[in-house]
């Protein structure tokens, strides 16, 4: 990825003998192994909001073509770390990020990195659907147009159609592309936002609790979409739903009080965590 202008075996149960959460089903066959190719490599990441430290020496490897879930209690640093990947913390007054986050070996915080180009290559989907006050077509066409990706009207139309199809939305909106995107349902709006993100051909998609405002049916559609998209993209999702993390992710990272407690294949985290704090969180003892 060119962002400039021109990735211990699991231990037995913890000392208190806590059993894994019985109500969360994990497909262990879908977990990523230690040999999975890396897309993102974070080391010694510390984040400050003024004098308050939000992240402490976070080190995490994120595999490509997989879904990595960031879990943990509210305020533990999950979203803060997510925003570090595409430098969204740059937009927060008083925020300071230290350490190194590499995408394909290139440090995103290097002074030579263009944040605009970075955010085109690392798409972001927020908690609340945020379509532009434009038509469905213009929502998806916006990125390719401003980045000069399409050289003709027909090419732009092709990008819009392909993006909507990848987002699983084309069949629902093909006959109303020139109607406002804000007129769609919440779940449709979120898929529109995902279509908008993938229209510029990113390599990483960040999702900050993308289903928290959606009903169960819309949530299921977004989860199915994530499972489809992971064959093409590196996806990192913040979620408070343990069941969702177990369903959609291949790797899980547990944060607590600004620190990364442990990370590994989702099957291992949910059935045989190494740290008692992880065990306590996924079984509902705190959080």
Image: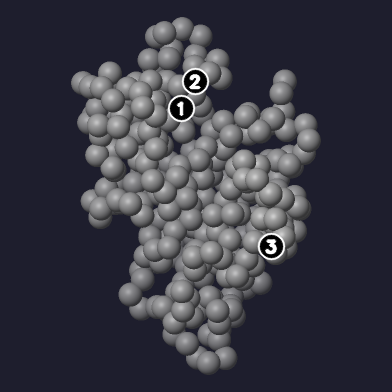
Q: Quadrant of residue 196?
A: top left
The answer, for residue 69, to whether it is visible in the render is: yes
Report which residue position mark 2 lands on: 144
Instruction: Find residue 58 and report its image quarter.
Output: bottom right
Whether the residues at callouts 3 and 2 have beta carbons within 8 Å, the answer is no
- Kindly identify which numbered label has been placed on residue 53: 3
Q: Choose the circle earlier in sequence order: 3 or 2.
A: 3
Element at badge 3? strand
Sequence-first disc among 2 and 1: 2
Residue lying furthest right in this view?
111
**Near-viewer residue (229 or 219):** 219
Q: Is residue 93 left or right of residue 223?
A: right
Secondary structure under the numbered disc 2 in the rendered image: helix
Q: Earlier in the sequence, mark 3 or mark 1?
A: 3
For disc 1, the marked residue is 199
Label 2 vs label 1: CA separation?
Answer: 6 Å
Q: Residue at x 49, y 68 (%)?
A: 73
User: Percent x, y for residue 79?
Assistant: 54, 54
Nearer to us in this view, 34 or 94: 94
Residue 40 tag number: none
Q: Tell me what residue is drawn at x 66 percent, y 55 percent.
A: 49
């Amino acid at each position: 990825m060119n962002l400039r202008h021109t990735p211990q075996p699991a231990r037995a149960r913890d000392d208190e003998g806590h059993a894994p959460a019985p109500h969360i089903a994990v497909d262990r066959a879908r977990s990523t192994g230690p040999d999975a190719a890396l897309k993102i490599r974070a080391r010694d990441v510390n984040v400050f909001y003024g004098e308050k430290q939000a992240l402490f020496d976070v080190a995490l490897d994120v595999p490509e073509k997989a879904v990595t879930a960031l879990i943990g209690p509210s305020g533990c640093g999950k979203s803060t770390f997510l925003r570090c990947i595409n430098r969204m913390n740059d937009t927060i007054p008083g925020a300071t990020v230290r350490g190194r986050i590499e995408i394909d070996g290139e440090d995103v915080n290097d002074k030579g990195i263009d944040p605009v180009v970075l955010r085109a290559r690392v798409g972001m989907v927020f908690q609340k659907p945020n379509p532009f006050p434009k038509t469905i077509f213009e929502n998806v066409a916006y990125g390719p147009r401003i980045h000069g990706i399409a050289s003709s009207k027909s090419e732009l139309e092709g990008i819009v159609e392909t993006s909507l199809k990848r987002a699983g939305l084309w069949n629902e909106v093909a006959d109303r592309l020139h109607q406002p995107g804000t007129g769609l349902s919440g779940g449709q709006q979120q898929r529109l936002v995902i279509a908008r993100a993938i229209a510029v051909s990113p390599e990483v998609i960040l999702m900050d609790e993308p289903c928290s405002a959606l009903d169960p049916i819309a949530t299921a559609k977004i989860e199915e979409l994530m499972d489809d998209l992971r064959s093409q993209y590196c996806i990192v999702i913040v979620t408070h739903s343990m069941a969702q993390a177990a369903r959609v992710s291949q790797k899980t990272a547990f944060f607590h009080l600004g620190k990364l407690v442990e990370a590994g294949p989702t099957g291992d985290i949910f059935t045989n965590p190494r740290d008692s704090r992880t065990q306590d969180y996924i079984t509902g003892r705190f959080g």
